[in-house]
Amino acid sequence: MEEIENTFEQFELNRQLLNAVADAGYTIPTPIQQKTIPLTLQGHDVLGIAQTGTGKTAAYLLPILMKVKYAQGKLPRCLIFAPTRELVIQIDKAVGELAKYTDIRHVALYGGLGPKTQIEAIQAGVDIIVSTPGRFMDLYLRGEIGVKDIKVMILDEADKMMDMGFMPQIRSILEVIPRKRQNLLFSATFPEKVEKLSYEFLEFPTRIEVSPQATTAETVKQRMFAVPNMQTKINILAYLFKTGEIQKTIIFTRSKDVADKVFDALKGPVIAKGDIRVIHANKGQNTRINSMDAFREGDVKVLISTDVAARGIDIQNVSHVINFDVPLIYEDYVHRIGRTGRANNIGEAITFLTIAEEYHIKKIEKIIRMEIPRELIPLDVEIAPTPFDENQAMLLEIDNQRKKEDPTFKGAFHEKKHPRPIVKKKAGSAKSGSGSSSKGSSSSSKKYGFSKSNKGSKR
């Protein structure tokens, strides 16, 4: 017993799975695997709360593959749902790797391309379907998927599914598949809406929580720069790349328009065109897949993305994650920075925030139960002047935030002054506040430390 303790041998998986596990380089089960695999093999419903990068995909796939064992009949026996096509593709790839020594048939179903090839794979016979909820219901309503043999259903990244509005499809799926089945639900966070879903979806589940909800991995160093505007964010990015501080990185933006602007600013002058890609909802499916594969293989060093790539994408050796914009769905901060520091490797997450994003950072820090360390803007970074329209938009956003907290607040963005960035002082420079602060500066100006003499200049 001592020889197999704390190895995959302890789970009494069949030799085909153990050989595949060895080929994949897995040696010691992670905590979520230690707790989930035995319970799933015993037929329990499982509610798993675990950070990204903890090995939860293998935690549910290994026992399910053990249950399915081999190809049988034409109809699927296991359904796995994920919120994005990228995650569906990744899970399906993991099924292929772990089932490589079996004849188990599996297919990935997702939108963005015609269903012809997917339908042909289903018609040829399939044991495991990995799918987005929308594409599954589309093919089911066409009569292409039989569900009477479904024995297991898994929801991965349940919190993101709810954020993306998949609940109507999930409820429709629950109405058409057999009621007698085993259910597994996994989520990196456990907000109230996911808890309600667990009552609806699971029967007497065993809850597994390998770390406190919404905590960040200890292997990820976090730091933050307070900046006045978008251009200064780009200037800091360019500086970090030029100094060689950042190697393989994902840059997350709030919108596809910002993603394109960052891409245009960096490609060529800062990063060789072949080393940087951008992915978002406007990019074609093949483009997104090819970009992700190129980044995974190391052919591309920088990937700019909206939150479409924030969850479940397991790419090794990502040295840095850059939050170019602070996420508005606060749990996404955990998912974003979970792209680095995976498999016990050390990673780093850098966040840029403006005065309008300070509100959201405070909410995030409350969720992750820690303050994110702030650093000074490097001396060689130019602090760009803030365009009037951008400044007004930020001040108006601050007013809206205050109204959200206090409905009686009438609005006063016209009274606010622009903040000053925190900057490193050169050796021998005057102490803070000696001749550089303007009379009557706001508390936010003092906090951020921006000075008019630094705007548009390189220090």
Image (tube, grey):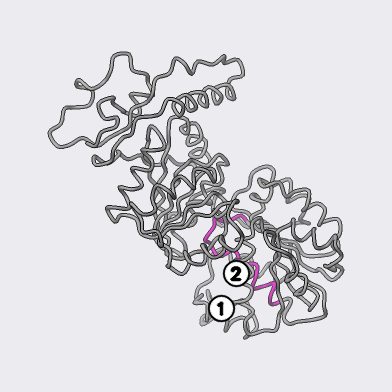
**Of marks 1 and 2, which one's residue comes earlier in the chain?**
1
Q: Residue at x 75, y 69 (%)?
A: 116
Would residue 93 be found to the left or right of residue 363 on screen? Answer: right
The boundaries of the magenta stretch are 49-66
Decide: is 306 above or below 118: above
Residue 390 shown left or right of residue 115 in the figure: left
Q: According to the image, label 2 marks what residue?
A: 58
How far from the left and from the top, in percent, is residue 171? 80, 51
**Residue 62 located within the stretch drawn in magenta:** yes
The location of residue 170, given as percent across then percent down, is 77, 53
Q: In this view, does 277 lie to the left or right of 63?
A: left
Q: Is residue 441 above or below residue 341?
A: above
Q: Do the residues labelled 1 and 2 touch (CB within 8 Å)?
A: yes
The amino acid sitting under disc 1 is: Val
Disc 1 marks which residue?
21
- Label 2: which secondary element: helix
Residue 307 or 389: which is nearer the viewer? 389
